[in-house]
Image: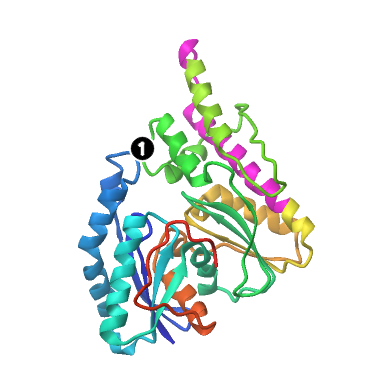
């Protein structure tokens, strides 16, 4: 089965062609980072306009790279949501046009589900699965009894972890995107500063707003009292505190669900080197569970994961008609 996937939920225009959930025949990603870093973050209107400019070119390049034609596609998969509504519309309209012009089934895909399914590119997931989704817009623990069931056990009550990284990076003057910059700087520092520990009501939920504010207050206090601080140490202290929030919830969740056979990670923050180290440490504590972190090439937004998710959705019977529209707040399914 050959599926063409289209992704345009934020600031990457991506098109990929994947065969049988495993073989990536082509993957084209047109990033807008250089544009949005001038603004310190993604500007939705600018992002959607650039998607319009890029989408046709990306489709052409994906077909050329894979050396296939549209007639060879079994279906067209596209991100329906969640994401920035204007950006999503560009991908959805492109997918609807292809499906209509070439008489192909149209399959709507949930962006976060696709991040989870990205792990299928390297391993066959064993159910029940516990998935950690960590990105700029989401932080969730998702329980999957089988391939097509999703139960959100915990989620952020305020900022997503990726958003917190970006905001802290802005406070430290590191620029956008903040995640890779803080990760790199933290490698040079030590966890020596005491920051506010996040507080949540749900036992599996997350919170990062207070931690972000704690960093800002720390910096202002140092400036007000003419004290100096080590940027690398502060980056390290922030990162360890943020990851403590994540991993404390993971452990509680794994302990409460002894049936879990496989733990997977998805989303852009899964590229974080310290998070990957702590996953390795977690493996030793739960030897009966398989742990998988997707390869770097499919951590950030891409269309390979959309094609994989589209394959699974297509096999389960999901289809959309000409009335398909983007849904910025679409719940995971």
At a point 38% along the width and 63% down the height, the residue shown is 326
- In this orientation, which residue lies closer to the viewer: 189 or 305? 305
Q: Which residue is mark 1?
A: 175
Relative to residue 325, is residue 283 drawn left or right?
right
In what quadrant of the picture does the N terminus appear? bottom left
At a point 54% along the width and 63% down the height, the residue shown is 332
At a point 49% along the width and 22% down the height, the residue shown is 219
- Is 74 located above or below residue 193 in the figure? below
Q: Secondary structure at mark 1?
A: loop
In what quadrant of the picture does the C terminus appear? bottom right
Task: Specify the quadrant of the image occupied by residue 177.
Answer: top left
- Residue reaching furthest bottom? 71
Residue neighbourhood size for the residue with mark 1, other residues' Cα within 10 Å, grouped as few (<14), some (14–19), many (≥20): many
- State the image coordinates of residue 93 (x, y, percent, origin top left): 29, 69
Q: Which residues are magenta?
A: 223-251
- State the image coordinates of residue 300 (x, y, percent, origin top left): 43, 58
Colour theme: rainbow
- State the image coordinates of residue 248 (x, y, percent, origin top left): 70, 46
Task: Specify the quadrant of the image occupied by residue 291.
Answer: bottom right
How many marks can you see?
A: 1
- In this orientation, which residue lies closer to the viewer: 102 or 29? 102
Q: Is residue 249 magenta?
A: yes
Relative to residue 44, is residue 211 drawn left or right?
right
- Is 274 located above or below residue 3 in the figure? above
Q: Is residue 45 magenta?
A: no
- In this orientation, which residue lies closer to the viewer: 296 or 246? 246
Relative to residue 43, is residue 229 drawn left or right?
right
- State the image coordinates of residue 206 (x, y, percent, origin top left): 62, 44
- The secondary structure making up most of the magenta span is helix
């Amino acid at each position: 089965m050959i599926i063409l996937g289209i992704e345009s939920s934020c600031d990457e225009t991506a098109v990929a062609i994947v065969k049988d959930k495993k073989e990536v025949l082509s993957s084209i990603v047109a990033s807008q980072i250089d544009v949005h870093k001038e603004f310190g973050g993604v500007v939705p209107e600018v992002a959607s306009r650039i998607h319009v400019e890029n989408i046709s070119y990306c489709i052409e390049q994906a077909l050329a790279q894979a050396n296939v034609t549209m007639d060879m596609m079994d279906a067209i998969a596209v991100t329906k949501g969640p994401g920035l509504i204007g950006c999503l519309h560009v991908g959805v309209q492109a997918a609807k046009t292809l499906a209509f012009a070439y008489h192909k089934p149209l399959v709507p895909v949930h962006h976060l589900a696709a991040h989870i399914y990205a792990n299928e590119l390297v391993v066959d997931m064993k159910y029940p699965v516990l998935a950690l989704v960590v990105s700029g817009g989401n932080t969730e623990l998702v329980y999957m009894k089988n391939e097509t069931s999703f139960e959100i056990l915990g989620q952020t009550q305020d900022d997503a972890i990726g958003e917190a990284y970006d905001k802290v990076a802005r406070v430290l003057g590191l620029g956008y995107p903040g995640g890779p910059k803080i990760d790199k700087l933290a490698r040079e520092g030590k966890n020596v500063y005491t920051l506010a520990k996040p507080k949540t009501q749900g036992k599996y939920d997350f919170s990062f707003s207070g931690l972000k504010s704690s960093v800002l207050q720390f910096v202002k206090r140092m400036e007000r009292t003419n004290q100096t601080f080590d940027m690398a140490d502060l980056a390290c202290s922030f990162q360890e505190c943020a990851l403590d929030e994540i991993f404390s919830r993971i452990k509680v969740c794994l302990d409460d669900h002894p049936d879990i056979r496989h733990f997977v990670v998805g989303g852009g923050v899964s590229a974080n080197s310290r998070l990957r180290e702590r996953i390795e440490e977690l493996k030793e504590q739960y030897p009966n569970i398989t742990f998988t972190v997707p390869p770097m090439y499919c951590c950030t937004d891409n269309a390979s994961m959309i094609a994989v998710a589209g394959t699974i959705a297509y096999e389960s019977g999901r289809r959309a008609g000409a009335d398909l529209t983007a849904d910025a707040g679409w719940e995971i399914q």
